[in-house]
Amino acid sequence: MNGFREPSDLSTQRALSEWLPGRLAAEQPPILVIGDVMLDGWWNGSIERLCREAPAPVVDIRSRESVPGGAANTAMNLAALGARVSVAGIVGADDAGERLRSQLAAAGIDVRHLHVHPDMVTTTKIRISSGGQVMLRLDDSARTVPDDAIAALAASVRAAVERQDAVLVCDYGTGVVAGHVRPALAEALGRRAGRADRPLVVVDAHDPRPWAALQPDLVTPNAQEAARLLDRKLPEGQGRVDAVAAQSALLLERTGAGGVVVTLDRDGTVLLTGDGVSHRTWARPAAEKQASGAGDTFVAALTLARAAGLPLTASLDLAQSAADVVVHQPGTSVCSTAQLSRYLKAFADAALGEDELERQLELHRAQGQRIVLTNGCFDVLHSGHTRYLNQAKQLGDILVVALNSDESVRRLKGAGRPINSVADRAAVVAALSCVDYVTVFDTPTAVPLIRRLRPEVYAKGGDYTPGMLAETPAVEEYGGRVAILDYVAERSTTAVVNRIRDGEGAVPSN
């Protein structure tokens, strides 16, 4: 466990509520971003003819926008989410470098460690689009980096690390950061080794292997990067999840990390630790995508949440929500605290009536998707719930969670329950990336709902057998399957409520 802050109210919070982004922003953790900064250009125009010299379209440019990209975009996301950000990198003494530096400073980012060198070319990536489609990307970058610029950057890193709660490395494979700055970072971290205030270290690199000696807390390779780490091609869809899960020990060994978060674009993310697959998130992708930098947003939100003390699994769900926000925005975008709060608030009225839910599920079945249904009170959400729901999601394509109504909970649990109203419970459960739909039922069992929705899989968590469940005959009568998932006794809601009422602290981590 690292020595960064873990306020008690955040370290026990597992649910994603609309107030959480503001609470994290209020922590204002100081975070240093080290890496390859660049300027992203988005030029948009219309195409009405081909040029005379070649069969190529002519784009009449109507608008130009330049925004921070690469490590600079990660820094912008951190600042927008409330962190106190410093950025360390190298830019040229050119128009792009001046524009990049001024935009970062305007966002409140400390640019004292962003070094300007007259012999450098600031890396730029200009995307030219028309009608919502990127037609061409123009990349410009320095072929070599002056030695004195690298030396200045290394010296900055040594000094800057001392004042940080987290260090986020964004290495895009240019060789500057991994080859020259890494030893300086290792030296600075070495001075804080064994201390309670050692910063959280997160590495987002095209190749995390050069950073393994730092023993980072987290690394965040995408699917292609994970495939290169494993020296093999990964299949698509669920097959990718299974493939990386089977090689979790090797990925941890080759990255030297405490945890590996493999980002899978439309398939969400997978957290790998020494116990195998520890957590999974599911993306809510845009139907049409002309966006860039969702990965930067994800790692920024993940780093902020962990630096502020949010548990790792909740941090991953929050980061997935932030990434979901930006994929619905054009260009290179950031997710702000206000945007993330609005996104989470949208789940507040999340419960669907049975008629609407039945219509939605028929649409999914028409696409060949399998429905998984589970039910319960889900009163005080905890890690046992999230693990169980993640397992349930993996049994099919669409996960429906049916919540007991408030009156139903009182009948089951007695006076004083539920702790949270059904509206609050629905909002919290719906905000989890693994959950697709939430509904509410008031009957003694879920049998009437099962007979109406006819899920391919009915999942239940607990120390049951299928024969003990009143719902099993209803599922089997139309050919469905009952699945019993993990039971985590020490993480039960009743146990949590009793600890709160008795004034006890959290259960110690294993």
Image: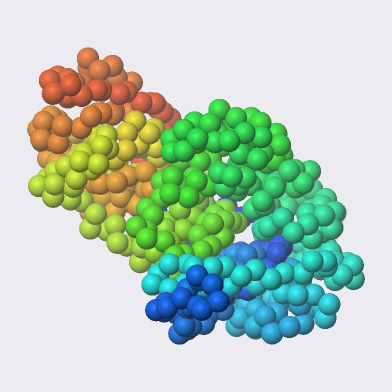
- Left or right, 418 with reference to 337: left
Dividing the picture into quadrants, the one containing residue 234 is: top right
Q: Which of 323 and 42 is in front in this view?
A: 42
Q: Which residue is drawn at 83% across and 67% down?
A: 145
272, above or below 306, in the image:
above
Q: Residue at x 45, y 60 (%)?
A: 322
Q: How many labels does the image show?
A: 0
Dividing the picture into quadrants, the one containing residue 440 is: top left
Q: In which quarter of the image is the C terminus?
A: top right
> What x and y, as percent, mark residue 333?
49, 69
- Colour theme: rainbow
> What x and y, as percent, mark residue 319?
49, 55
Q: Which residue is drawn at 23% across and 58% down?
A: 349
107, above or below 443, in the image:
below
Q: Is residue 405 visible?
A: no
> What x and y, as percent, mark residue 14?
43, 47
Q: Nearer the viewer, residue 216 or 227?
A: 227
Q: Residue furthest top?
A: 467
Dividing the picture into quadrants, the one containing residue 17 is: bottom left
> What x and y, as percent, mark residue 153?
82, 68
